[in-house]
Image (tube, rainbow, N blue to C red):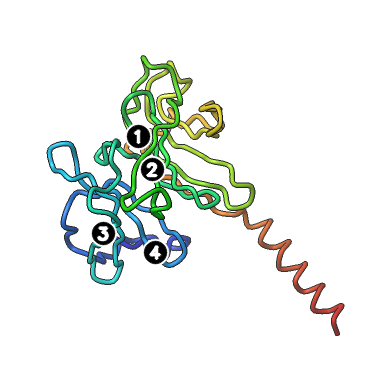
Amino acid sequence: MYRVADPFGTPSLELVVPTLERRTSSIVWEGDTLYGIQGANLDPPQTLVTIDPGDGYVSPVGTSGATGIDPEQVGGLTIKNGVMWALQNLHAGELFTIDYKLTGGPEPTATFVRTTSPDTIAFLSCGLAIDPADAQLWAMIRSDRLLGSDIGVYQLDETTGQLTLMFDLSELTDVRGASGIAVIPEPASLALLLVASLLVIGAGN
């Protein structure tokens, strides 16, 4: 597990944990807790875990983990309004929710929601993220031209499974191996927030 140092200057990877116990396909932060999906069909049990980013210590959230989902094929995890979403690479991008807070019982379970593309289209890789500003789900998907792009960035409507191509990255060969995606608030918005804060402070004086 690596940390990206100086991401807006001269990015470099810093090794944080040399080896996790099992294959970990996706991670997501929820507050101060780092969650991950571990395991594979040939490496049971399939497990939802928490990971200590300091020493790599892994704690299973439940004894059987995220059942019903192939963790090796999870391309992205994200959390929206207290719901954990997972997008799988195979089977036309199957979308799941994961009961990571154990509200439904003693063990976390994965619930199939819907496929996000025609059954004939298998995702080669995918990532999932949420825009903190409006809770819009975004996906980076590498597939084939039937989906509109060899690799592209899509808006994902979790209520319908509709994928809307926003950025076609097919000509950028350097990103063909990319599977992760994150949404960062644009600097203009941050500047506006800063100005607003200054104005509020000034009014208070």
Q: Earlier in the sequence, mark 3 or mark 2?
A: 3
Where does label 4 land, which residue?
33
Where does label 1 land, which residue?
88
- Mark 4–mark 2 Cα distance, whole angstroms, equals 17 Å
Q: Residues within 10 Å of mark 2 (few under 14, many from 20)?
A: many
Quadrant including the C terminus: bottom right
Q: Earlier in the sequence, mark 4 or mark 2?
A: 4
* Label total for image: 4
Give, as a three-letter code, the residue at label 4: Thr
Q: Nearer the viewer, mark 4 or mark 3?
A: 4
Answer yes or no: do the residues labelled 4 and 2 have beta carbons within 8 Å?
no
Give, as a three-letter code, the residue at label 2: Gly
Where does label 2 land, which residue?
76
Give coordinates of residue 66: x percent, y percent.
30, 44
Q: Residues within 10 Å of mark 4 (few under 14, many from 20)?
A: few
Q: Helix or strand or loop: what does disc 1 sit on?
A: strand
Q: Establish if 134 lies above or below 19.
A: above
Where does label 3 land, which residue?
1
Answer yes or no: do the residues labelled 3 and 2 have beta carbons within 8 Å?
no
Q: Earlier in the sequence, mark 4 or mark 3?
A: 3
Q: Helix or strand or loop: what does disc 2 sit on?
A: strand
In this view, the residue in front, 203 or 49, is 49
